[in-house]
Image (spheres, grey):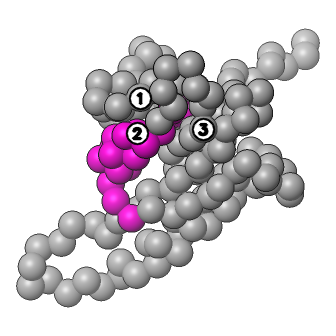
Amino acid sequence: MGSAGAPFQRIIVGVDGSQASVEALRQAQRLAVPLGAKVLANAYWDYPQVYSGYLMMGIEGFEERAGEILEETVRTAYGDETPSNVVAALVRGHPRDALIEASRDADLVVVGRRGHGGFGGLLLGSVSSALVAHAHCPVLVVHTPEAPPEPA
């Protein structure tokens, strides 16, 4: 993490394939360029918890699917040419815990807000709420921009 007055070096973005995480990547890049920072686009995955003794059937492919989601989200955010300062990584672990831990070595963490519209949309999702409360660096929570109104 940069010391007081030092430039930002690392902006971590939690990527989950949602429109909000696409916007988080775009906002992180808007901040990173003038600061000369790297954007670390991290997608987190883990196997579902199973009881010991149960066969782990039908749970293969989680890592591969998370990798596909990461690639799709980065492509949606930046097009075919990923900026040279953006590094995409697949990280095994629960998003909340892994992002809090990653925030120890970051200058900023950017995540999308997962709302459900209406009143519920005013509430932050569990990952973003945990980050705001427990991160070791500043956190920027972004939401999906509203679509422009349809022409009359």
Which is more N-terminal, label 1 or label 2? Answer: 2
Which residue shows up at 39% across the image and 64% down it? 92
**Rendered view: 59 above or below 102:** below
Does residue 17 appear left or right of residue 95 in this picture?
Answer: right
Which is more N-terminal, label 3 or label 1? Answer: 3
- The three-letter code of the residue at mark 1 reads Cys
Does residue 91 appear left or right of residue 55 in this picture?
Answer: right
Are circles 2 and 1 on residues that touch, CB within 8 Å?
yes
Q: What separation in Å lies between label 1 and label 3 (alpha carbons)?
A: 12 Å
- The three-letter code of the residue at mark 3 reads Gln
Which residue shows up at 61% across the image and 67% down it? 68
Mark 1 against mark 3, which lies toward the viewer?
3
- Give the x, y percent position of residue 70: 60, 59
Residue at disc 3, secondary structure: loop
What range is drawn magenta here? Answer: 92-110
Which residue shows up at 37% across the image and 40% down it? 104
User: Does the segment drawn in magenta span residue 108?
Assistant: yes
- The three-letter code of the residue at mark 2 reads Ser
Which residue is label 2 attached to? 103
Residue at disc 1, secondary structure: loop
Mark 2 against mark 3, which lies toward the viewer?
3
Residue 85 visible in rendering: yes
Which residue is label 3 attached to? 9
Residue 100 lies in quadrant: top left
**Rendered view: 97 above or below 147:** below
- Give the x, y percent position of residue 10: 57, 40
Which residue is label 1 attached to? 137
**How crowded is the residue under tag 2: few (<14 C-alpha within 10 Å), some, or many (20+)?**
many
Q: What separation in Å lies between label 2 and label 3 (alpha carbons)?
A: 12 Å
Are circles 2 and 3 on residues that touch, CB within 8 Å?
no
